[in-house]
Image: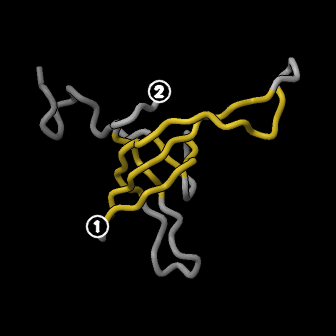
């Protein structure tokens, strides 16, 4: 998996409204910082475990939103997390302007 770095484009999943007025949606975001935080776990050697988090500038139709300490989730997205953008269709498949043979 690639490592997040400042300036990379990622996807942020919004929380959505508790009453359902606004659904949880995926938004484009720019990485503004990458940090390591110690989580309340120990590895097999008894040392502290660190987890990488990012700061994001989330781009919404209504404006920008800044969030720090956002964790990565691989798989079904949870509100308040980030993930790498999906790639549809695969480059070179002949669909969507990709290179054809």
Residue pointed to by mark 2: 3
Label 2: element kind:
loop
The one nearer the camera, 47 or 2, is: 47
Residue 48: % across, % down:
79, 28
Q: Quadrant of residue 93?
A: top left
- The total of numbered circles placed on residues is 2
Instruction: Name the quarter where the C terminus is drawn.
Output: top left
The answer to whether residue 54 is left or right of residue 47 is: left
Residue 36: % across, % down:
61, 33
- Residue at 45% in and 25% down: 2
Circle 1 Cα neighbour tier, 10 Å, few/some/many (<14 / 14–19 / ≥20): few
C-alpha distance separating marks 2 and 1: 27 Å
The answer to whether residue 72 is left or right of residue 30 is: right
Q: Quadrant of residue 63?
A: bottom left
Label 1: element kind:
loop
The one nearer the camera, 65 or 60, is: 65
- Residue at 44% in and 52% down: 12
The answer to whether residue 65 is left or right of residue 89 is: right
Q: Are marks 2 and 1 in contact (CB under 8 Å)?
A: no
Circle 2 Cα neighbour tier, 10 Å, few/some/many (<14 / 14–19 / ≥20): few
Residue 40: % across, % down:
81, 40
Residue pointed to by mark 1: 61
- Residue at 20% in and 26% down: 92
Per the rendering, the mark at residue 42 is none
- Residue at 52% in and 78% down: 20
Q: Quadrant of residue 44?
A: top right
Chosen colour scheme = secondary structure
């Amino acid at each position: 998996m690639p490592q997040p770095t400042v300036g990379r484009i990622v996807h942020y999943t919004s929380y959505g409204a508790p009453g359902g007025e606004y659904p949880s949606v995926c938004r484009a975001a720019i990485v503004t910082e990458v940090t390591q935080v110690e989580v309340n776990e120990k590895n097999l050697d008894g040392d502290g475990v660190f987890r990488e988090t990012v700061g994001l500038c989330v781009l919404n139709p209504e404006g920008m939103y800044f969030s720090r300490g956002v964790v990565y989730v691989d798989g079904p997205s949870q509100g308040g997390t980030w993930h790498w953008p999906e790639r549809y269709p695969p480059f070179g498949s002949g669909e969507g302007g990709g290179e054809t043979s």
